[in-house]
Image (cartoon, helix red, strand yellow):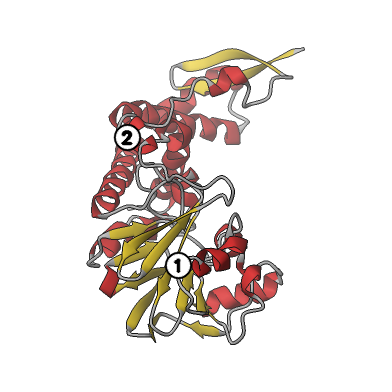
Amino acid sequence: MRKLIYILTLAGIVCVQVSAQSPPNSPEELQRYVPVLPSVKARFWKTDPSVGYAVQGVGGGVYVISDNGWQSAFLVTNEGVIVFDAPASFGKSIPSAIAKVTDKPITMLVYSHAHKDHIGGSAAFKNIKDLKIVALDTVTEFLKEMNDPNRLIPNVTFTREKTVSLGGQTVELTRHAYHSNEGDLFIYVPKARFLMAIDCVTDGYVPFQGFDITANFHEYMKVFDELLTYRFETFVGGHLTSTGNRADVKLNKEFTMDVYNTVKRIHNNMDFAAAIAEAVKTVGPDNEFLLFKVFLDKVTYESVKELRPRWIKRLAGVDVWLESHVRTALIYVRWDDN
């Protein structure tokens, strides 16, 4: 049984046949995507198959943990260890990973934000005596409401800024609003020139779907300049296959602003009335949702067509997530922008 799916464009309506039984990610469909860039693959971490993760020291007492999917970090001081996030994928292994590096006790766990993929492994820390769990007040209130046993409730909260001092080291925590509704932290270790800001920059890749499923694209576009005010050499964005640096932040800014500016130009220069009038010839004037979709789909199509060649060889994942980025920018341009 085959069905017709109508794809509306400014030039008219193109009729395409698609098998009703074919899954959206069939082998034929998946083969349309390009492999990960060789330059990115070369930076994959060599994880130990027996444990599923790797640990790398980046200087200044900071160590990063990764399973090539998620990232966490910890800071070893003279008086104890501060852990930054406990991802659901390998959080249970963080205490043993730290024990291989130092005999200092874990004294503090800092949450970057509330999402369970980054802190859903914190239950592994529940038996650590006198552990301080630090998070934004809004994150704490949200976690209390969720009542998730895998995300321990913070016992040290703050509103905007907090400096943590332990064993001759300091960690600067500052609130931002680029990603999650409950707030996001910049985690900065000055002595190590280490900066961690989860779900905004993934070095070597475009962001995850919809600019890292941002809840506020307006603030997201500001995050790169905010990051670059810090003196850092190592950057951790929480995902995938290596740590980053200032160049990665700058490249992700260039990509984000190119998407935004391209979508804005194409949207603002497109003749809305003409697009609708052309579609009315085929479907009539009554289905206003469909007619509006014609216009939005045309802006999306033209934006992706222009952007893809510029970025397909510069960042991995362009063909995977570019349309979602364009649609996120389009929502902002259409409903929020000047």
- Where does residue 74 sit, x and y in percent of width and height? 44, 69
Q: Using residue 103 as the reference point, say whether residue 267 is left or right of it.
A: left
- Where does residue 80 sit, x and y in percent of width and height? 45, 81
For the point 45% across and 72% down, which residue is it?
A: 102
Tell which of 95 and 264 is nearer to you: 95
Most extreme residue toward the right, as rendered?
Answer: 1
Q: Using residue 324 as the reference point, say whether residue 249 is left or right of it.
A: left
Determine contact: label 2, label 1, CB under 8 Å. Answer: no
Write down the residue under mark 1.
101
Q: Is residue 106 above or below residue 43?
A: below
Query: Local crowd at mark 1 within 10 Å, few (<14), some, or many (≥20)?
Result: few
User: What type is the residue that disc 2 sits on?
Assistant: Ser
- Where does residue 293 sit, x and y in percent of width and height? 53, 33
Q: Is residue 326 above or below residue 124?
A: above
- Where does residue 266 sit, x and y in percent of width and height? 33, 34
Q: Is residue 18 above or below residue 311?
A: above
Q: Using residue 74 as the reference point, say whether residue 142 is left or right of it.
A: right
Tell which of 115 and 264 is nearer to you: 115
